Amino acid sequence: MTDSLLTLIIFFPLLVTAVVLFLPNGKDLLIKEIALGATGVQLVLSVILFFSYDASLQPENWSNAFQFVERAKWISLYLGDYGWLQIDYFVGIDGISLLMICLSTFLLFVGVIASWNLSKNVKGYFILYLILSTSVVGCFAALDFFLFYVFFEFMLLPMFFLIGIWGGPRRGYASIKFFIYTLVGSLFILAVMIGLYLSVEDTSLADQTQEVVHSFSLVNMMDGGYITDGILTPGNATEFLGMNIRWIAFILLMVGFAIKLPAVPVHTWLPDAHVEAPTAISVLLAGLLLKIGGYGFFRIAYGIFPDAAVSLTYPIAIFGMISIVYGGLTAMAQNDLKRMIAYSSVSHMGFILLGLASFNVQGAGGALFQMVSHGFISGALFILAGVIYDRTGDRGIANFSGLAKAMPVFTGFVVVFFFASLGLPGLSGFVGEFLVFLGALGSDYLPKWIGIVSISGIVISAAYYLWALQRMFFGQFWTREKVWEQTMYDLTARELLLLIPLAILVVLLGIAPNVILGPVNNSIEFFVNQCFEQSQLYLAQ
Amino acid sequence: MTLLKIIWPLIFIIPLFSGIIGGLNHRQSLKLSSFGMAFGLFLALILVWMLDEPLILEWKWLESVNFGFSIDRLNALLVLLVYLITLLVQVFSITYMEHDPDQDRYTAKLGFFAFSMIGLLMSNQLVTLFLFWELVGMSSYLLIGFWYQEAGRSRAARQAFMINRVADAFLLLGVIRVFNNGYATSFTETLASGIQWDGFTGICFIIGAFGKSAQFPFYGWLTKAMAGPTPVSALIHAATMVTAGVYLLVRISPALMDWNLQVIAIGGAVTAFMAAVAALTQFDIKKVLAYSTISQLGYMILGIGVGAYQASVFHLWTHAFFKAGLFLAAGSVIHYMHELDATKDPQDMRNMGGLQKILPVTFYAFLICGLALSGLPFLSGFLSKEGILTGSWLWGQSTGNYLVPILAFCTAGLTAFYIGRQILLVFFGEISFAKKMVEPLVTIRVPLIFLAASSLWFWNSINPIDPLGWFWNGYLFADLGATSDQHSILGVLIGSIVLTLSGLGVAYWLFRPEAETARGFKKSNEPVQLAGKISFHGWYIEKFYDQIVRLFSKVVFGAGWFDKKVIDRFVDGVGVSGVVIAKVIGWFDQNVVDGLVNFMASISQLIGRFVTSFQSPKIQIQIGWLLLTLLVLLLWFQFLT
Amino acid sequence: MITSILTYIFTAITIAPIVYILITKNVIRAVFSLAFSFLGLSGLYVLLNAEFMAVVQLLIYAGGIIVLMVFGLMLTKTTLNKGFITQHRSLFFGSLVSFLLFISLAALAAQSRFKVGFIEQTGDPVAQIGQLFLTDFIIAFEVVAFLLLVALVGASYLAKKSGE
Amino acid sequence: MMEMINPTYFVFLSLFIFCAGIAIVIIKRSAIFVLIGIELMLNAANLNLVYFSQFDPGMNGVMTSIFVVVLAAAEVSIALAILLNIFKHYKITDPDELTSLKN
């Protein structure tokens, strides 16, 4: 059963979508239950995956670093003088993607509950929702660049409609902006993909066909299965715009994934998308889609171009630092709660860039942990923002005050998650940041001042969170519209059901982070060492 | 030994447990949690009594980081102190908070604070220390902002937390540098290995400690912290939390470099002096005590800086008792004033006076603790302060830097003055109101009596003069072997007694009931001349913070504006043009506003319209154009090719 | 010498009615002047010793087509004679196009050097034509026959439909 | 005898008739005029054919022009039939008015 587990996890929601398609439109509750069931099964499968993942594996190179590998011929065309085009359904996970899959299945499950009282054409919503879940999990497990790219693009479609149809007032603008922005990003990735495809060959198939069989498999690319005269082959350093071609490919990938991350200069789609997205969707958007960007750095940018990564650590760290500080500053200037949380996500994602740039085990581990913990925290924060929005249809920080009086339990959760997000030790936010700082200050690639300036990030995040907390929750109870005062009832059972597991997870990860970092540690160590060795190998050529 | 292994984690969990129990049931929350704390106190006593060599408990938290607690004599004693003071405060607040609606939340927060404070005291690994350090900061945030209804209090809580957060950022930086430079990551190892930290790491730790113990640049938050309920101020902002910084410095002092210790000494001395000056002209009863706490903390830190950390710990111990006593007494005064008439500010000394006969027990407690604070002989304050003064004097002689001793001695005098002033203003003079209130026996009187009594000298050492006579001295520092020259020097002894008496005398002369300044005091408002203003506004430290915040928010809104206007516009500019240009260009802009795509559409429409004009419906015209094109082709092939 | 004078006469007979058609607005007069121009043409054919052609021209064009046109005209006229008066439109455009075409084609014709080899006619041209019809042009002959059938049937059907 | 008349004379003549035919088609408003114009153009072509067939022993020119004449006849008959139909339907003969396709 465990050999096809991964495919089952990826495509089970798609199966269920087929079932949902045939259901008549009216049966909202049934559709919701089916969706809950589907994501629930997916969650259970991923838990099985987590426990049957063998953490003691000490891989030597990328080809045997992955477990639960499934490979099947998908497309193989004979293109005349271009030799064989070989794309195969190649799926597998290592520690990093394992965590990402567990995070996404959990958040998808939570997302279904969060969108329980949805009324507008429920069937369409949940079909898109399940497609989204397939593509997200598929993206994390794909080991073939083409397959990764297909899932990467496939994710945009449902997201575009989910924001575009069920979103807030300015949803049209926001969804188009989101779509085009990420699409442009994926164009860069496509360019690099093709470049890589043409310069990597799959030796296993070559003997049958006596010609050069190019391949998309990431494992080949990472293990350096380059043909001698490929464009991106490390040795032949063709200059382009004054830089080694591999550097440019790496930069293109970084920009593509930085848009998704988002990093500062290209982040402006995130606040709009979040403000307009419905609650459950912005939970997914913050929890999962941002992690695809981060995962892309880990698996693709750093995996395939370690030499470029090593020599460009300085600028990447600078961007990471700017994201942290700049994201924090702009968050403070927002007056819409959801927009503030969106900007805080930009700031937290900056830690990932910084962690990766430090190029050591603590930094990479910190970046990975930050992704997981940010997934839970920002998911909860958006649910909380959604709670206010569902009750009053408005999220302005200035439009409320003294909510603690009216909704004490709600305020309790807000305090817990605000403090988790600003990095109070004992909650999961701190662990990620602490490891990233450890990595950034201890790394011998980065100057010390970058780490020190980013530490100011935790002060800024404390500032805007507490300021928002004070304006909205403390002081006399007042709401801008008199009618809202009646609707400000405290958390309902459903919302509690959402928030309690997230709170437990955040506290658990804060106290005992080794629960998830332990099993994954080998793959992080392997990832960093392998990147380092490969970079020395390539730089030597 | 195994008994200790069982008791130890229990001591750690009990406050949290009692807090939760208290938090859950609304009615008897404070009583229940105080029983829990009493039990915890009993266990702590056993622990202190039976402990001989340190116990260490450690487990792997993260790959390169592990989580560890250790208990040795010093923090066992301090844990006992925390338990004792928390119990007393809880008993006190049973009446103080009796008609406060959300008592359960108050108990839960108190329990959470005690838990995190004990955690801080017990933690051995630096990361664990940082974790509880921040939790203590958070619990103080929650407690200061307990009455969140009033915006002022929650703002004070936020500001307090922010200032702490800034200092904690440095502490975090220090912890990370310890990890990266490969120093020992736990107190026990640093003590054993004796590695010297580099200067910058030391400074980071010092700034962290200064932040928590409200030393020079960071002491603004303690006066703001007075916004919390008085029992909270007594517990947290007098006895326990603020001493965390002192405790940290005592722990890491073996690893600090010499110039770091000098920084500590000077920092402590300067803070002590400034706070003492600031306490001179305050009107709010709690503000005076807050500044005096800052000043006494300055003393302790000064003691560490000059190497007399036994005296500092002793001063920490005695200060906890008499300062808690002072605060609780002030609390009962405020409670009384509040009962009297809620309109006037219960904390303002100007509407107090002559409470001597009305609240006798409070008066005597306040009197004894106040005199202990001022350093009168035969009281605990004198002994511990004496130790620090001797240490600073000896240090001054050995290093030739006499600034620190001078400041220390001046502060001693000033302390006596402002506490004398306070006692006279609050308790003496004519009674401005008649209502007599009998303090509830148990809950208010007992803690006051206990604290007042503990400020007498014989609780702490037989010989009222010798600072080293402290009972616990042998217990705590037996292994270090008390350095002989710590014995009091006659000159220092006499100097400090003279200073204290003169301070009290001047205070009495100025503020005795019949003196015109005392009578004028009731109606006086803020001091006008420079010195008075500096003192009243606490050296304008809070104004300094506001300036930083204003600058900061300007930057923030600049960033917000920048983000909204420039980057967002830049992105929209590609599709939708929104950059504000002069109105004329604006009109042109309007055409581009509906985007490149529509623009394309309009172009093609234009071309379309032009082309269709050829294909007019009239057939003949079409024939005509047909022939014309034929003609053109003909000419082209014929003549041009 | 005679033939050149005759040629000039016949060309005059063809050109004059054409010019008249160009000018007139009256359709009836235009049709009859067309008939005259066909006469001129058939005269020219005779001079080009294609007598059979001249006869055919007279017979079909002048006889058949003109009559057809007159019938068409009569049937489509609405009121008494208003139907015959038409207007000119885009006069300038039409004349410009035709004039340009004339100029360019004339320039083209002037450039080309026609090979003029005069061949003595042998035997009876009409017999030769009949023979050619059934030898070289047999396919064309059959196709045209069939086409004429289709055309006439079609025309009569259309006309009939319009009749009811 | 024939040499006196310059060969291009006939070409010019047929060219003139042809262009006149075009002018008539474009300028005149009545459908009948268009037919007249077409007839003229056909005759111009015939003239050219006949003139050059005299140099051709196989008399192809004449044969073609005969076919042309026959076709012209067929064409005119159909044209008129259509014209009648249009007239019955729309009551107009002016080609410009026929704009039903354009809607």
Image: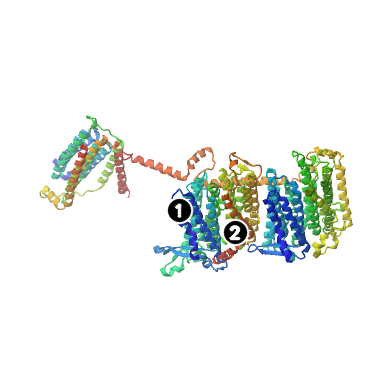
Precedes in sequence: disc 2 or disc 1? 1
Circles 2 and 1: CB atoms closer than 8 Å: no
| Res. A7 mark | none
Residue B419 at x, y percent in the picture? 82, 47
| Res. A369 mark | 2
Q: Image check: A75 left or right of A253?
A: left
Q: Nearer the viewer, residue A434 or B78?
A: B78
Secondary structure at badge 1 equals helix
Looking at the image, which residue is at 61% across and 54% down? A503
Label 2 marks a residue whose chain is A
Residue C72 at x, y percent in the picture? 20, 36
Mark 2 packing: few (<14 Cα in 10 Å), some, or many (20+)?
many
Q: Nearer the viewer, residue A234 or B540?
A: B540
Q: Which residue is mark 1?
A: A20
Q: Residue furthest bottom?
A: A207
Secondary structure at badge 2 equals helix
User: What is the distance, in whole Å, between disc 2 and disc 1 at their CAs?
Assistant: 35 Å
Q: Image check: D101 left or right of B261?
A: left
Q: Nearer the viewer, residue A263 or A15?
A: A15
Regarding residue B116, the answer to whether it shows in the image is: no
Q: Image check: A363 left or right of D66?
A: right
Closer to viewer: mark 2 or mark 1: 1
Residue B221 at x, y percent in the picture? 72, 48
- Image height check: is B327 above or below B175? above
Regarding residue A419, the answer to whether it shows in the image is: yes
- Are discs 2 and 1 located on one and the same chain? yes
The image quadrant of residue D17 is: top left
Q: Residue furthest left?
A: C123
The amino acid type of the residue labelled 2 equals Phe
The colouring scheme, among rainbow, by chain, secondary structure or one colour, is rainbow
The amino acid type of the residue labelled 1 equals Val
